[in-house]
Image (cartoon, helix red, strand yellow):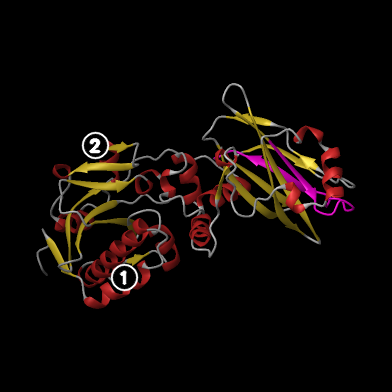
Amino acid sequence: METIAQLHLEISPEVQRQAWQVARTGTSAIATWQTYLNQVCLNTFLPWLRLNYAPGANAETNTALLSGWDIVNGTAITLNNQRLILIPNQTIDTSELLIPQEWVDLPGWAGDYYLAAQVNSDESWIRIWGYTTHEQIKAIADCDADDRTYHVDAQDLILDLGVLWVVRQLYSGEVTQAAIAPLPTISAAQADNLLHRLASLDVLQPRLELPFQLWGALLERENWQQRLYQLRHAPQASQVVNLGQWLQNVFEEGWQSLESVLTGEELAFNFRQVTDLTETVARRVKLINLPDQSALLLVALEPETDGRIGVRSQLRPLDRTLHLPSNLRLSLLSSTGEIIQSVEARSQDNLIQLRRFRSALGTRFRLQIELDDTLLAIEDFQL
């Protein structure tokens, strides 16, 4: 059996070709390259591992791998009842191992052993240059709050991979994992709101978009992780409506003036219903498809003397002779998916509106339209 103190493995042309085919599904340049590195690393190292040490070693399922690589660097490999986390990197600098926080602080993701893998795609090889344990990471490494990465100095790694197999064979009771703080529980509704926020391809690094506790709660559920992958790979991406530009009379496609949508008689009727909207500085409507009819979602802005912006929002039938469906709900959500306020249509209602609120420029929020348990529309805004 070969000595593996400095394990070098050749990346075959076939592995490279297949990796690029898979990587093209990435939603950004970051995701594409990350997927490629993980694919070539896994498909080069795993066959060697099975042949030499662990015939029963397995990676996660393909769906879980792809959805994970799109957002977090690294691959989990199972060895009997333990997990080995393979962290690839293309840098020539091996002075430290960089481990995404997810692999350390999520109970469902944490491993027993963490392997540093250097990938040289130009010369077609990978090198496994050191490893450590979860227990050691938590004991000696700090997590950078900006990039949510644990930095482990090379001098704190075991550089001979052969030691790992000796330890596993002779010291099966070795403590490899440290305690992990539990994550909060979030509802399915909040998770759905967060996932749709992260679905926008304008969000280049979803893992840095939310507070880690919320992000972690999403990833702990594999079906939510895969749902995020599906949403980000959908043909259409959610556009964030820039309300600040509305004050300069710049409007996104699909947002129209009331005058362009309604006839003179209908316009007068709608203005009589809510007269306090006639003096707003910026006002636009968007057509929303409801079961058996169409409605108008209206958003109006009113600058305040303190620099904040007042926001009003309404939902009304396009045809003023109709009523809104009972149980139709219009909700205002925060940037973290929490419902701030909500209003629901009763029988015979031809208008529902949220309470006026004020926020500073730069604030993000969401308007969501639901009928019973069916989500009909989501609109994301930034002041």
Query: Distance from label 2 to label 1 (Cα)?
Result: 34 Å
The quadrant of the image that shows the N terminus is: bottom left
Q: Is residue 307 above or below residue 183?
A: above
Could you tell me which residue is drawn at 34 percent across and 67 percent down?
A: 58
| Left or right placement of residue 131 versus residue 176 in this view | left
Could you tell me which residue is drawn at 24 percent across and 36 percent down?
A: 140
| Amino acid residing under circle 1 | Ala
The quadrant of the image that shows the C terminus is: top right
Q: Position of residue 372 (x, y in %)?
A: 76, 52
| Amino acid residing under circle 2 | Ile
Q: What residue is pinned by disc 2?
A: 140
Q: Position of residue 285 (x, y in %)?
A: 70, 48
Residue at disc 1, secondary structure: helix
The stretch drawn in magenta includes residue 319? yes
**Residue 189 visible in image:** yes
Toward the top, the furthest residue is 306
The stretch drawn in magenta includes residue 11? no
Name the mark on residue 19: 1
Q: Position of residue 235 (x, y in %)?
A: 53, 65
Alpha-carbon neighbours of circle 1 within 10 Å: few (<14), some, or many (≥20)? many
**Residue 372 visible in image:** no
| Residue extent of the magenta highlight | 312-335
Residue situated in front as seen by the camera: 264 or 319: 264
Residue at disc 2, secondary structure: helix
| Left or right placement of residue 190 versus residue 41 in this view | right
Residue situated in front as seen by the camera: 35 or 239: 239
Alpha-carbon neighbours of circle 2 within 10 Å: few (<14), some, or many (≥20)? few
